[in-house]
Amino acid sequence: MAVTIQNASRKKARLVGAFKQLFHFGWEQALSCVFPVVIFGSLALTKIISLPFLPRYDWLLIIFLFMQWWMVRSGLETKDELKVITLFHIIGLALEIFKVNMGSWSYPEEGFFKVFGVPLYSGFMYASVASYLCQAWRRLNVELVKWPPFFVVVPLATAIYLNFFIHHFWVDIRWWLAGLVMIVFFRSWVLYEVNGARYRMPLALSFVLIGFFIWVAENIATFFNAWEYPNQADAWSLVHLGKVSSWVLLVIVSFLIVATLKQIKKKYRHG
């Protein structure tokens, strides 16, 4: 009887400990998502409330710029992280301009700060992914195990990014690239820390999970008219599930860029 009670107590303690770890993990994730949350909150707020003097797209740009200034000013974001986010804003804006002019989606509302039909705030949608990666990397003390060499990672990331453009004129090789990612990162793991305890996850699995949650976020964003797909012109509808593959590839590009920059900075410090 005493042994049974003792075993039950151990199981209860393990269960409580698991919930505590899950809470800590969720809290760190929430803190890492501050900028994306502001983006979605602003999309919802400006959809419900009409702000004066400027078009909605311009207000969104002002809000996002102010938020970035505040994050750096408050210490929530480092200057190095701001540099990475700025890089992603430029990369994302270039992709947006191309995709919009190819008819993949559109920004139907008016705005003063638009370039070739694309509002400047749109680059922050990509920058928010980089913001999350940088914040989570620092908060969870991320380490990479069996990370592929530089001469493999850079061409792979470049090929994935270029495929977003080239597939409009040539064959879409996203599935070949996805297969190549699985081969290259088959033995790679990501280590992360939650409340002093270390955990690990296959790197490829983390790509899929983040890509799926971005797809969920995309549905929220299109619902609030952040942008509009052709099939959403008359009424909002769920973004096709196949879009997850595009987001997974984008996450891979984003992660490879962030990880490569982290590796370079680490070598520079130790060099």
Image (cartoon, helix red, strand yellow):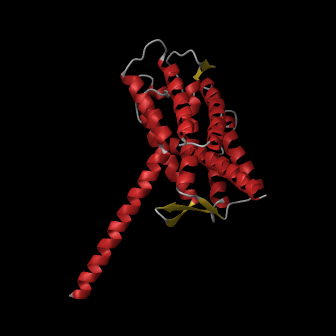
In the rendered image of this protein, does residue 150 appear above or below residue 171?
Answer: below
What residue do we see at 53% from left, 24% from top? Answer: 62
Q: Position of residue 91 (x, y in %)?
A: 66, 35
Say if residue 65 shows up in the picture: yes
Q: Position of residue 201 (x, y in %)?
A: 53, 62
Say which of 179 and 140 sits in front: 140
Locate residue 81 relative to residue 221 in the image: left or right. Answer: right
The image quadrant that residue 42 belongs to is top left
What residue do we see at 64% from left, 55% from top? Answer: 181
Q: Where is the C terminus found, in terms of image quarters?
A: bottom right
What residue do we see at 56% from left, 36% from top? Answer: 73
Say if residue 152 shows up in the picture: no
What residue do we see at 49% from left, 52% from top? Answer: 209
In the displayed image of the protein, which residue is found farthest to the top?
53
The image quadrant that residue 16 belongs to is bottom left
Locate residue 95 relative to residue 31 in the image: left or right. Answer: right
In the rendered image of this protein, does residue 165 appear above or below residue 102?
Answer: below
Q: Where is the N terminus found, in terms of image quarters?
A: bottom left
